[in-house]
Amino acid sequence: MEARLNLFASPTVSKVFKHVNAAGLAASNSGVPKLTQELVKIRASQINGCGFCLDMHTKDAAAA
């Protein structure tokens, strides 16, 4: 079975991932407490309807 969309072969997607990672790094270095950052990510995951991200960020918030 062949994938319909290969995200890793797309130069546009790699640019988007690079910018998303840079934004995440800037947020991490902003001085905002880690727990607050995770709560924001939880809310964004709820808005986006991403169950995987919601689970991941909930666990990260509990650890923080």
Image (spheres, grey):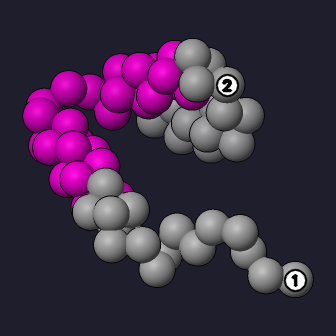
Indicate left or right for 12 with 48 as reference: left
Q: Are marks 2 and 1 in contact (CB under 8 Å)?
A: no
Residue at 57%, 16% in the rendered image: 47
Badge 1 element: loop
Rendering quarter of residue 27: top left
Whether residue 44 is visible to the viewer of this picture, yes or no, is: yes
- Count the labels in the image: 2
Label 2, residues with CA under 10 Å away: few <14, some 14-19, many ≥20? few
Q: Earlier in the sequence, mark 2 or mark 1?
A: 1
Residue at 15%, 43% in the rendered image: 26
Query: Disc 1 residue type?
Result: Met
Which label was assigned to residue 41? Answer: none
Residue at 61%, 19% in the rendered image: 46
Magenta residue span: 17-45
Residue at the far front: name it: 4
Residue at 46%, 28% in the rendered image: 41
Q: State the image coordinates of residue 14 (x, y, percent, origin top left).
A: 34, 68
Mark 2–mark 1 Cα distance, whole angstroms, equals 28 Å
Figure check: 33 above or below 4: above
Indicate left or right for 55 with 39 as reference: right
The verdict on residue 44 being magenta is yes
Question: Residue at label 2?
Answer: 49
Query: Disc 2 residue type?
Result: Gly
